[in-house]
Image (cartoon, coloured by chain):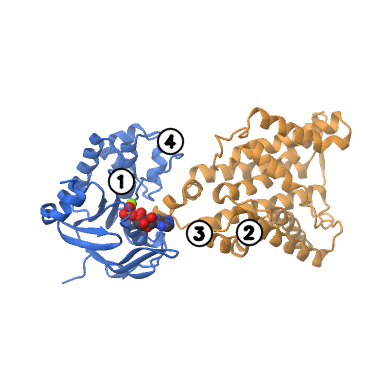
């Protein structure tokens, strides 16, 4: 059996003397949607930062399609097909919507205008003028233009109005249906677990529980800690 | 009068070329590169050296661009990159660039001494045309044309090209730029190459126009470029160009109407007044407008 698309082994992330992630293991298979849930400060963003090359892992291995990427610079990891929609969206507020899309490196950005007509309407505006939800769609569109093999999403619903949260999850559901491989980090554990094939629960930098999304939804501990049940 | 205007356009073009490189590095990397005047001087002397080997002036300018561009990349590797990796405060980058600047000037003095030099006889166009009663020398006209073309070229590069987009992304949000797969080291090298290359061309052209390059010719330009950048709006490229011409017209006007001792005082006073009216500079948006 071939190795899963993303294999992370013994990943340690440190900020100076502080260790935020203490040697975690997880994987994401081709076409799978995997959720990474956990409380604020659990180390979810740190994990994604290490996978994307923003932070050099202190230890461990990150393999994408069998290729070792731990410690590689972000542009190499991006070129290998690992594309992140970061927490807080990180769109370029002073640049236009159109320029934000062009920054994906894609020559033709029209498919995203067809997919997200609101972006076509706003194409000449500075991206900073968009609403939070529109910015999130822009960030997702920009990532999709890079044709990712694995899409990392860090709290895509954070800070959005309820209606926009539904829109964003509808987009993710479409992507899942189209076979996009995703690693989804979410505070909104209920929605994330419903969407995910499998999930990991990160607690203070360690993986606590793991299982299918449905199994974790039924788990009492997860219910109490993350679903407010 | 027309003569003075022509002169103001000429010197403003040199200021603008100089300030553009200075502004480019500042806007993308938040670094005040105090070695920029040394690169300007290096440009004049690279052209001098090339022309002493029989290279024609036009080609010597291209060589000055390439040599200074390369020196700029090296400058970043030596003076700025190690500090960047350690997240050192911006002030330490200023100190290390002063250090590199002194080394470059000393090396030039080692070869050419501290005195005024001149370009080989006959290597620069010396003819003067009279157009509508105005004395126009070919050399300055060509220099103005080239400087304006370079300003337009840089603006288009920054506004329209993929590299320009990457530089603006890096200026606005380095973390986002990295996540978009931008090769940040390459983009920084390109920034320094362009900046230093433009500084080198400015030096070569200024050296040509005065025909007296000397090792301290960059002195004074630093302060002017800094003022021009602030008045134009920190980090704004069109702002730097506007500020440069404003300064040169101010200087020439003060020379025409006031005793020459007041030249700098008047020119800088003018810039000061602009800042009183628009504290963030002519084209500055709020605190910082980038590229
Ligand atoms: N740049 C940083 N410097 C120091 N500590 C950090 C930094 N970023 C995150 N941390 C710490 O690492 C831990 C994990 O943070 P983070 O990965 O952002 O968690 P999450 O995304 O799960 O909320 C937290 O204790 C946080 O304070
Ligand atoms: Mg986070």
Q: Which residue is mark 3?
A: B186
| Secondary structure under the numbered disc 2 in the rendered image | helix
> Alpha-carbon distance for marks 1 and 3?
26 Å
x then y, percent, for residue B42: 73, 58
| Residue A188 located left or right of residue A100 | left
> Alpha-carbon distance for marks 4 and 1?
17 Å
Instruction: Kindly identify which chain the residue marked by label 1 belongs to.
Output: A
Rendered residue at 81%/63% (across/down):
B109
x then y, percent, for residue A198: 16, 58
> Alpha-carbon distance for marks 2 and 3?
13 Å
| Shade representing chain A | blue
> Alpha-carbon distance for marks 1 and 2?
37 Å
| Residue B186 located left or right of residue B141 | left
x then y, percent, for residue A141: 31, 44
> Alpha-carbon distance for marks 2 and 4?
32 Å
Contact, mark 2 vs mark 3 (Cβ under 8 Å)? no
> Alpha-carbon distance for marks 4 and 3?
26 Å
Whether discs 1 and 2 lie on one chain: the answer is: no
Rendered residue at 40%/67% (across/down):
A71
Q: Which residue is mark 2?
A: B72
Q: Is residue A22 visible?
A: yes
Q: Which residue is mark 1?
A: A140
Q: Which residue is mark 4?
A: A126
- Where, by quadrant of the figure, is residue A53 drawn? bottom left
x then y, percent, for residue A229: 15, 46
Instruction: Kindly identify which chain the residue marked by label 2 belongs to.
Output: B
Q: Is residue A177 visible?
A: no
């Amino acid at each position: 059996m071939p190795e899963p698309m993303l294999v992370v082994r013994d990943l340690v992330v440190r900020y100076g003397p502080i260790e935020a992630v203490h040697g975690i293991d997880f994987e994401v298979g081709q076409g799978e949607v995997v959720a990474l849930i956990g409380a604020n400060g659990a180390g979810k963003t740190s994990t994604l930062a290490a996978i994307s090359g923003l932070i050099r892992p202190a230890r461990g291995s990150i393999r994408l399609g069998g290729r070792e990427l731990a410690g590689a610079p972000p542009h190499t990891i991006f070129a290998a097909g690992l594309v992140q929609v970061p927490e807080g969206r990180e769109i370029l507020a002073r640049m236009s919507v159109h320029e934000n899309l062009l920054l994906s490196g894609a020559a033709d950005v029209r498919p995203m205008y067809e997919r997200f007509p609101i972006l076509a309407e706003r194409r000449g505006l500075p991206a900073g003028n968009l609403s939070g939800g529109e910015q999130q769609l822009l960030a997702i569109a920009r990532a999709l233009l890079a044709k990712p093999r694995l899409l990392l999403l860090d709290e895509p619903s954070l800070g959005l109005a309820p209606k926009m949260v539904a829109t964003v999850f509808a987009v993710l559901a479409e992507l899942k249906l189209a076979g996009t491989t995703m690693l989804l980090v979410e505070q909104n554990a209920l929605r994330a677990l419903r969407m995910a094939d499998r999930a990991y629960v990160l607690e203070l930098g360690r993986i606590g529980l793991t299982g299918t999304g449905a199994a974790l939804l039924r788990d009492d501990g997860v219910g109490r800690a993350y679903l407010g049940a | 009068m027309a003569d003075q205007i022509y002169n103001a356009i000429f010197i403003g073009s040199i200021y603008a070329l100089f300030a553009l490189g200075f502004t480019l590095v500042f806007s993308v990397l938040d670094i005040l590169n105090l070695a920029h005047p040394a690169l300007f001087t290096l440009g004049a002397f690279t052209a001098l050296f090339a022309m002493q080997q029989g290279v024609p002036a036009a080609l010597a300018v291209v060589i000055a661009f390439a040599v200074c561009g390369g020196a700029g990349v090296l400058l970043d590797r030596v003076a700025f990159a190690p500090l960047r990796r350690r997240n050192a405060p911006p002030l330490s980058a200023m100190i290390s660039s002063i250090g590199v600047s002194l080394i470059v000037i000393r090396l030039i003095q080692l070869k050419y001494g501290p005195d005024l030099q001149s370009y080989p006889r006959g290597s620069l166009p010396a003819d003067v045309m009279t157009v509508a009663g105005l004395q126009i020398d070919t050399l300055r006209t060509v220099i103005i044309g080239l400087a304006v073309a370079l300003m337009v070229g840089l603006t288009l590069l920054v506004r329209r090209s993929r590299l320009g987009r990457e530089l603006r992304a890096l200026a606005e949000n380095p973390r986002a730029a990295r996540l978009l797969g931008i090769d940040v080291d390459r983009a920084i090298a390109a920034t320094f190459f362009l900046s230093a290359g433009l500084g080198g061309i400015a030096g070569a052209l200024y050296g040509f126009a005065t025909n007296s390059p000397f090792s301290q010719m960059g002195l004074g330009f630093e302060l002017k470029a800094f003022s021009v950048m602030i008045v134009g709006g920190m980090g704004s490229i069109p702002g730097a160009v506007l500020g440069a011409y404003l300064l040169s017209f101010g200087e020439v006007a003060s020379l025409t109407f006031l005793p020459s001792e007041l030249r700098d005082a008047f020119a800088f006073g003018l810039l000061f007044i602009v800042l009183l009216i628009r504290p963030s500079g002519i084209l500055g948006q709020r605190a910082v407008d980038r590229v």
